[in-house]
Amino acid sequence: MGGILNFYMYINLELYRIFYITAKLGSISKAAKELFTSQPAVSQSIKLLEGKLGGQLFHRTPKGVVLTLEGEVLFKYIEQGYGLMQTAERKFLELKNLNLGKIRIAVCSAVCKYHLMKYIEIYNLNYPNIKIYIQDKSSYEIVKGLESGEIDIGILNMHIETNNSLNVIKRFKIQDCFVVGDKYKEICEKQISLRNLVHAYPIILLEKGGNTRDYIDKYFSSHGLEVVPQIELSNMELMIEFAKRGLGVSCVIKDYMQKELDQKQLYEIFIKEKIPERIIGIAIKKDIPMSTAAQRFIELIED
């Protein structure tokens, strides 16, 4: 058994790097350009790796290359290792240059604007030399990014499965609700059932694929409803604007709508079947030391 393990350990890591870049870009020519080498050199390296592993990693197509089933399995693990190696390099450079650094944060746009922005402003004032990279991602993508080492800090919905791989350092609650503009404000005069609401009025939801939409769809399903919205939008800002203009009933995060509610630009509908609160978590990868820049940001949030 030890001999088999040693065999795989002695495969040149550069071959795995070439494999990773080629798989990521889906093209030998693009990989060669990224690696500052020739296409034949990339092809030869891939053939060498395939020979050492004893199996084909790519299918060649007119548009480039695609992974075989075996290649996909290998890529899944190489991707994690590659991300961890990049994290290791970054940690070394930060230790060497204490006045430089960066933090990579992934969060959905609504949470960033209404909850995270104040911390980013303070952080930028205190540490102007630290670069801040903000990515708008779904919670599922955030978990993947944390696990692969591509991001430092993730703010995500806690109702998804995280495989116990994350350390959640802070939690806060948010409340979803249904709102309308002046055109439909008579709905708000008395309590209404969810079934009557979705059958009598045009519903506006976020587009499918995100965690908020998934959460609301499950809420509908728990009450025996399968809702097909009249309008689907890509972000919370549009949801607010469409409701204001009387285009329907928008499902939004109440915590971020208080100004519009106070100014009577929007009106909350009182549903008999209240939407359950959601828990948002600020998370990092377990057992991976945070950069100094990320640690300072976490300390700011915790204060």
Image (cartoon, helix red, strand yellow):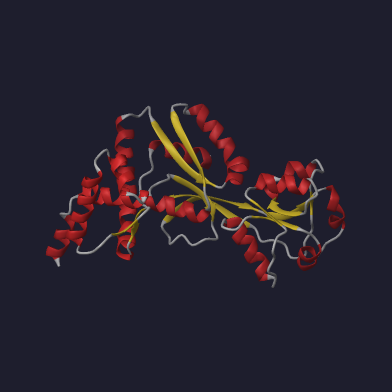
- From this view, report whether residue 121 is shown above or below residue 150: above
**Who's the residue at 31% across and 51% down the image?**
20
x and y percent of residue 10 in the render?
15, 54
Could you tell whether 129 is left or right of 243 in the image?
A: left
Q: Position of residue 86 (x, y in %)?
A: 32, 43
Report x, y in % for residue 26. 36, 51
What residue lies at 66% left-to-right and 65% top-to-bottom?
219
Residue 3 occupies which quadrant of the picture? bottom left
Q: Residue at x 77, y 54 (%)?
A: 248
84 sits left or right of 228 in the view? left
- Image label count: 0
Farthest bottom residue in view: 224
Foreground residue, 159 or 24? 24
Q: Can you say which quadrant of the picture contains the N terminus?
A: bottom left
Q: Is residue 271 above or below residue 25?
A: below
Q: Is residue 285 visible?
A: no
Instruction: State the image coordinates of residue 216 (x, y, percent, origin top left).
Output: 65, 61
The residue sitting at the front extreme is 62
The one of 268 and 80 positioned closer to us in this rendering? 80
Is any part of residue 62 visible from this angle? yes
Residue at (28, 41) in percent of width and height? 35
